[in-house]
Image (cartoon, grey):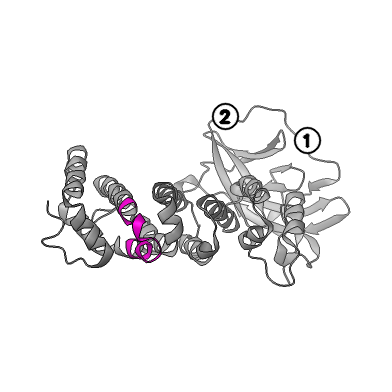
Amino acid sequence: MSLHSTTPLTGALAAELAAGRDRYNGLFLSARREHRRLDAAAVLDHLRHRLPPAVEAVAAVDPAAVPKVMTTLYELSLELIGRELLGPQAQAPQLNLVFDLLLPAMPRLLAAAPAKLTTALINAVHKLSQERGFILPLWVDRLVEVAPGCPDVPTLLALGQVFAWRGGLSHFREGALDLMRQLPADQVGVALGLRDGDPSPETCLTMLEGDPFWRPELARCPQTLRIVGKVGRFSGLGGEFRTPPSVMCVSGQLVAFDERACWSIHADAYGARLRRLGPNLPDGEETPTPAGRGVDREGRVFWGAAHKTFPELAEPSGVACSEQLMVVTTPSSHKIVLIALAPEPT
């Protein structure tokens, strides 16, 4: 395959292809031996439309890095097109966001560590795109916005995990907090989107570690007993449970289960999620519901001195509590209602 005769390319990408013509053609032939359906036209189209923004951005800040960056992007692109994750038969077209938006916004980082950065972003976009309800374009926009101020690739990837957590993936909470503890204060502020008048980054980290339902923009809001999320659906409609689930707290971890599978429950100020654990309950002791907490037949929730009635919780079939979250089920629903003492947005 010729990478030049039929493809109207210009600039740094065209110059690099010309300089390394035999090598790039050899990479294509090698990839085609592994992926018999690798389509030359799809590769040429990708070269024409997807790679120029990132390569030209690198050429503008570090021309000497262009060969290394181009080789990395080309090899990864051949693999993705060969596996039909990119190209006309793409099974994962969202990966184009990496080439179209993310990489062009971070040329210095791309020049410094092309394989590490590109592979990490491809994996992140692929995994995040599979999370139900996650707004991937918002995550991409946030990374694009902060990329120019990132000192290195590990910081950018840490910010990416925090942004995913803040985007609703509550099971990322502990990992995001661990990463922020390792960041300088100014990058913690970036990760949390702090504005003038918000608590300091150090204060925010302390508060977030102590209260999963606290977040900076709610710092001055009063706490109230309220529904903080709902999770679970009927498996026949693409959900998790064939029958209305049961709930339990096992060694401090809230879980929901039916006769087929068990799921861990994760919730905080940024979202609520179920994560599949497997067919069986996790090992550990059942954690009893703390004294002073419960739900009566009318749907009145008791939490120490606080109480509030939620009519949808009347005749509850199951109640379980962790230290800072209560989960409630009802006999005819596959949905699990999550209750907590949490700041009420005003």
**Which is more toward the observer, 216 or 112?**
112
For disc 1, the marked residue is: 288
Distance from the alpha carbon under mark 1 to that under mark 2: 19 Å
For disc 2, the marked residue is: 280
Q: Is residue 275 left or right of residue 128?
A: right
Q: Is residue 266 left or right of residue 118?
A: right
- From the top left corner, tell me how far across and down residue 160 is, in percent: 53, 55
Element on which disc 1 rests: loop
Residue 334 visible, this angle: no
Q: Please report the residue visible at 72 percent of the width from the left and 56 percent of the height from the top.
A: 213
Dot 1 surroundings within 10 Å: few (below 14), some, or many (20 or more)? some
- From the top left corner, tell me how far across and down residue 129 is, in percent: 44, 53
Magenta residues, as a range?
A: 55-68
- From the top left corner, tell me how far across and down residue 113 is, in percent: 43, 50
**Which is more toward the observer, 275 or 135?**
135
Dot 2 surroundings within 10 Å: few (below 14), some, or many (20 or more)? few
Element on which disc 2 rests: loop
Amino acid carrying label 1: it is: Pro
